[in-house]
Image (tube, helix red, strand yellow):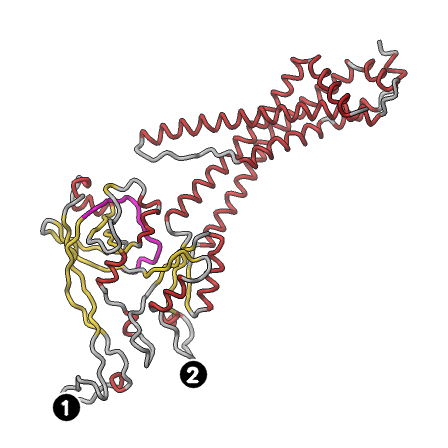
Amino acid sequence: MKTYDLVELSARNLRESLLRNSLTTLGIAVGVASLVAMLSLGIGLQRLASLRLERSGLFDTVVVFPRRGMEGFGPPRAASAAPPRPLDEAARQEIARLAGVAEAYPEIRVPTEVRYNDKPFRTVVEGLPPSAAETGAMEGIQGRFFSKPEAMEAILQSDFAKGLDSKTAELIGRPLTLVYAGSVSLAKSGPGSSQSAPAGKQPSPRSDRREPAGFSAVRKQLSLTIVGVTESQPNAGFERFGRARVFVPLALAEKMNPPQISALLEPAGAPDAGPAFTTLIARVADLKNIEAVENSIKRMGFNTFSLQDATRNLRQFFAVLDLFLGIFGSLALAVASLGIINTLVMAILERRREIGILKALGASERDVRRLFFAEAGAMGIAGGAAGVALGWTIGQLINFGANVYLQRQNLPPQTIWLVPWWLVLGAIAFSLIVSLLAGLYPAARAARLDPVQTLRYE
């Protein structure tokens, strides 16, 4: 039997029992719609969570710190071992050039006294890079982000802003004063230095070795303008001095030059190559590069920390969630497959004479099986396409209702239900496979009919 004849005959047979075949196809459509709705919910939630986490700045960053900072937690370093590499500007530039690293910047947090309307408030100030403007923490910000990298401007965290003024919107454009301790490096002393030791005292061993003499803390203050108020915490590093409540441009925070403990722990004889950082933040362009970037930084002689394990556990959770949602969604499709079996079995009883004539005219058992498979496949494809359309419509209605509710709660709209193209193709293919499997028994039964007995049936 030619393919054209097979398609024409199966289409005619489907049209003859239009109501019954339509109801069977509708059952398949409902099953596919439930499958698509369940899986699209899991996919939408996973995408929503992933985007929020990526934009939070927590999961696409690697925190870098010198190995000297961890020596107190492990065995002592051998006397002959080389000193740890300092985390200085040269190291920062080298990390920024690594493959997969979008940017590298120091984590600067400064304990300060904030003065607003001549009232003091103790908090922590943190420097933000220009890329922080694209993070999720800046969504819905009152006001704006910093106008330029070194602007004398500040962004306040919402809870802290409410402590200054219950009407946070009125803070925008108001002046703010920061009082903090800035570090000033002490001059090096030693043989040949213009600064000699006090009378009656011998130069210290550090001075003899021409090592940095340390730093002194000097009381300083800055006058800033409040330009924004944000709800979230736009940071990704360690909260060494507590949670930051005031944010300034990173370039401005570096100029504040807060005291760094690492300045007192420089290796003996280290050249004065600039300040050493306590912590660096390396932001990667793609979450897939986290592990490779960490390994590269460790080979440079630094310790690292990231939340890669947490993202791995998150992906595992959503994989299990999608599996269970798919199983529950497939139950309705399994029930629909019973409808296909019932419809085709009834077709055998009604078309015994037709089957006998076909076999008497030379149709083989394979041709009869192909005929019933074609009818089952046609119902599967039509039901799968209708089910995908129905599932997509359900998702759009739920997205619309959810966004209406979120807007009433003064929250930004979100895409909760997501139907990617691969789910559309996969659902139709799965529907076709289930339909063909459901047609196995009716097709085999029809192929085994004796043409003599079928012609005597009526």
Report if residue 128 lies within the magenta region.
no
Would you call the spot at circle 1 few (<14 residues within 10 Å), some (14-19), or many (20 or more)? few
Q: Nearer the viewer, residue 334 or 279?
A: 279
Q: Position of residue 261 (x, y in %)?
A: 28, 69
Picture residue at 81% right of the left edge, 14% below the top: 354
Q: Position of residue 145 (x, y in %)?
A: 26, 47
Q: Give the main secondary structure, helix, strand or loop, of the magenta stretch.
A: loop
Q: What residue did someone put label 1 on?
A: 200
The secondary structure type at the circle numbered 1 is: loop
Q: Nearer the viewer, residue 129 or 294?
A: 129
Q: Amino acid at mark 2?
A: Ser
Q: Provide the residue span drawn in magenta.
A: 226-242
Q: Amino acid at mark 1?
A: Gly
> Where is 259 relative to 450, above or below?
below
The secondary structure type at the circle numbered 2 is: loop
Q: Is residue 194 left or right of residue 398?
A: left
- Quadrant of the rendered image containing residue 244: bottom left
Q: What residue did someone put label 2 on?
A: 80
Would you call the spot at circle 2 few (<14 residues within 10 Å), some (14-19), or many (20 or more)? few
Which is nearer the N-term, disc 2 or disc 1?
Answer: 2
Picture residue at 73% right of the left edge, 16% below the top: 13
Q: Quadrant of the N terminus?
A: top right
The span from disc 2 to disc 1 (Cα, nearest Å) is 35 Å
